[in-house]
Image (cartoon, rainbow, N blue to C red):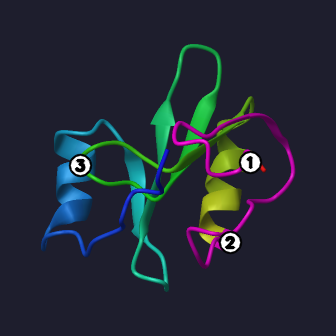
Amino acid sequence: MAEPAIRQPPEGFDRWMVEQGGYRHPRQLPDGSYAGLIPLLYTTGLCLGVTEGGYLRRYCYEDPERALEALEHLESVEDEPLDGWVARRDPYGLDAG
C-alpha cells in the first residue's frame, strides 16, 4: 500500500481533533504534522500523523501520564516515542520492511 500524503491540515485542526476526532492533548509538531492522545479500552493511544482520515502510527501506553510525556517529546511524525509503550499499530504498513 502506498504511503498516504501528509497535507497541511486546515486552520483550527487541533480543535477538530478534540471536538470531532476524540483526541486529547492535540499538538502540532515542529515538522507540521499533528499528534495526540486517544483513550482506548485498556490503554491510551499516542497517535502520530493525525489527519481527518485517521493516523499513520499509534503507540499504546498502559500509563496515560507516560503517553502524555512521550507526546511532549515528539519533534516529527517519523519519531519513535519514549519507551514504555506496550503495542504499536501501523494501519498503512509503513514499518513493514
Instruction: Calculate the distance from the C-alpha at mark 2 to the C-alpha at mark 1.
Output: 11 Å
At horizontal 58% and vertical 37% (from top left) the residue drawn is 45
The kind of residue on which mark 3 rests is Glu
Image height of 73 relative to 84, above or below? below
Other residues around mark 1 within 10 Å, as few (<14) / some (14–19) / many (≥20): some
The kind of residue on which mark 1 rests is Arg
Image position of 67 (left or right of 17): right
Q: Toward which corner of the image does residue 34 lie, by quadrant?
A: bottom left
Dot 2 or dot 3: first in sequence order is: 3
At horizontal 53% and vertical 36% (from top left) the residue drawn is 91
Residue 10, x across and y down, in percent: 14, 70
Q: Are marks 2 and 1 in contact (CB under 8 Å)?
A: no
The kind of residue on which mark 2 rests is His
Image height of 64 relative to 77, above or below? above
Q: Which residue is mark 3?
A: 52
Of 30 and 97, the residue lying toward us: 97
Depth-wise, is mark 2 or mark 1 nearer the camera?
2
Of 17 and 78, the residue lying toward us: 78
Other residues around mark 2 within 10 Å, as few (<14) / some (14–19) / many (≥20): few
- Please, what secondary structure does the residue beneath circle 2 have? helix
Residue 26, x across and y down, in percent: 39, 58
Q: Toward which corner of the image does residue 25 lie, by quadrant?
A: bottom left
Let me know if residue 80 is in the magenta part: yes
Image position of 20 (left or right of 62): left
In the picture as drawn, the residue positioned furthest to the bottom comes out as 30
Stretch of the chain drawn in magenta: 73-96
In the picture as drawn, the residue positioned furthest to the top comes out as 41
At horizontal 26% and vertical 39% (from top left) the residue drawn is 21
Q: Which residue is mark 2?
A: 73
Q: Which residue is mark 1?
A: 66
- Please, what secondary structure does the residue beneath circle 1 have? helix
Dot 2 or dot 1: first in sequence order is: 1
